[in-house]
Amino acid sequence: MKLHEDGKRVEAENLLREKELKAETLKLATLARELKIESDQSSLNSTSNPTDSFRKSEMLDGMRKAEAIEKLAHGVRERMESPAVN
């Protein structure tokens, strides 16, 4: 009976891990898509000559988003490389 309970627990933990990884991967893709859109818009806006403070603000926002993407990607990679519960 103990082995059966342990098996169910392991299966539940692995399903939760998979669900969390899928959610984090989706968030990663969403952030990357948003950064791409903002970058494209920033390129278009640079030709219309917005103020320097506005451009700096956009750049800082983009850098923060890029850092968040990097952090999340690193965490997803580490979790994917770590073994599932057995």
Image (tube, rainbow, N blue to C red):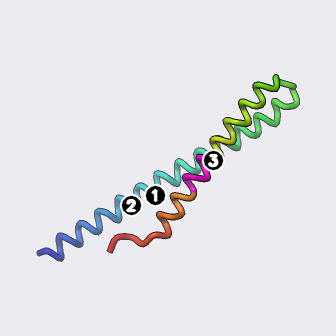
Quarter that holds the C terminus: bottom left
Q: Which residues are magenta?
A: 67-73
Q: Which residue is mark 3?
A: 67
**SS assignment at label 1:** helix
The percent position of residue 2, horizontal first and vertical second, equals: 14, 74
- In the rendered structure, which amino acid carries the disc numbered 1? Leu
Q: Which residue is mark 1?
A: 21
Q: How dense is the environment of label 2, judged by Cα within 10 Å: few (below 14), some, or many (20 and up)?
A: some
The percent position of residue 27, horizontal first and vertical second, equals: 53, 47
**SS assignment at label 2:** helix
State the mark number for residue 17.
2
Residue 76 as seen in the image, left or right of residue 33? left
The percent position of residue 31, horizontal first and vertical second, equals: 60, 44
- Dots 1 and 2: beta carbons under 8 Å? yes
- Residue at screen point 81% across, 36% down: 43
Identify the mark nearer the N-term, 1 or 3: 1
- In the rendered structure, which amino acid carries the disc numbered 2? Arg
* Viewer-nearest residue: 60 or 80: 60
Q: How dense is the environment of label 1, judged by Cα within 10 Å: few (below 14), some, or many (20 and up)?
A: some
- In the rendered structure, which amino acid carries the disc numbered 3? Glu
